[in-house]
Amino acid sequence: MFSKKQETTKIDREQRELIEYAQYRIKQKKNLFRHFIVFLAGAVLFIILNKFLDFGVNFRPAQVDWFVWATLIWFFFFLIHFLNVFLFSSFMNKKWENEQLDKLVAKQQAKIEKLKTKVEKEHPLPTTSKPEITRPNTPLEP
């Protein structure tokens, strides 16, 4: 009839954020590694197509084989992905976003307070005085 409550481990908010951030970073690095593998496989495929299967042999922009240009362009995109994961993500992460959000909210609140004081100063609310009741059982005069 009566059962003991099983103690459940609760993760506080800060630990949860750390775990979510770690999972996010792992996912980013995993996707970067996949991109690198696909990049290597694609570059090898380009070389095989050009050198062994004679695909696009006559197409040589700027006197360089087409697969070199394709690989360089793909490498450029991989480099952007790499910089995004390891450089930009390290200082423009969720913590940075929250700090920027807090700064903007504080700035907006300061402007709102400034406007409130300006409105109160320029357009004060009318003060009405309530009649003082000296004899509670007598009717008010019109």
Image (cartoon, rainbow, N blue to C red):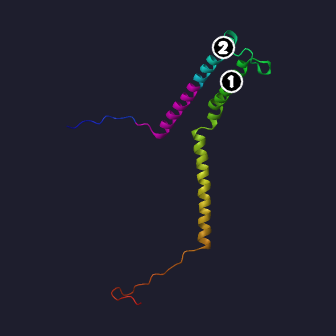
- Mark 2 is on which residue type? Leu
Determine the CA span between mark 2 and mark 1: 18 Å
Q: Outermost residue toward the right?
A: 63
- Magenta stretch containing residue 7, yes or no? no
The residue to which callout 1 is attached is: 75
**For mark 1, does the 10 Å Cα neighbourhood hold few (<14), some (14 to 19), or many (20 or more) residues?**
some
Left or right: residue 27 compared with residue 11 = right
Q: Position of residue 52 (x, y in %)?
A: 67, 9
Residue denoted by label 2:
49
Magenta span: predominant SS is helix
The total number of labels drawn is 2
Front in this rendered view, residue 66 or 112 = 66
Q: Residue at x 50, y 80 (%)?
A: 128
**Kind of residue sitting beneath label 1:** Phe
Above-or-below relation of 142 to 125: below
Q: Which picture quadrant has residue 137?
A: bottom left
- Please give the name of the residue rendered at 60% of the width and 53% of the height, measured from the top-left corner: 106
Q: Which residues are magenta?
A: 10-31
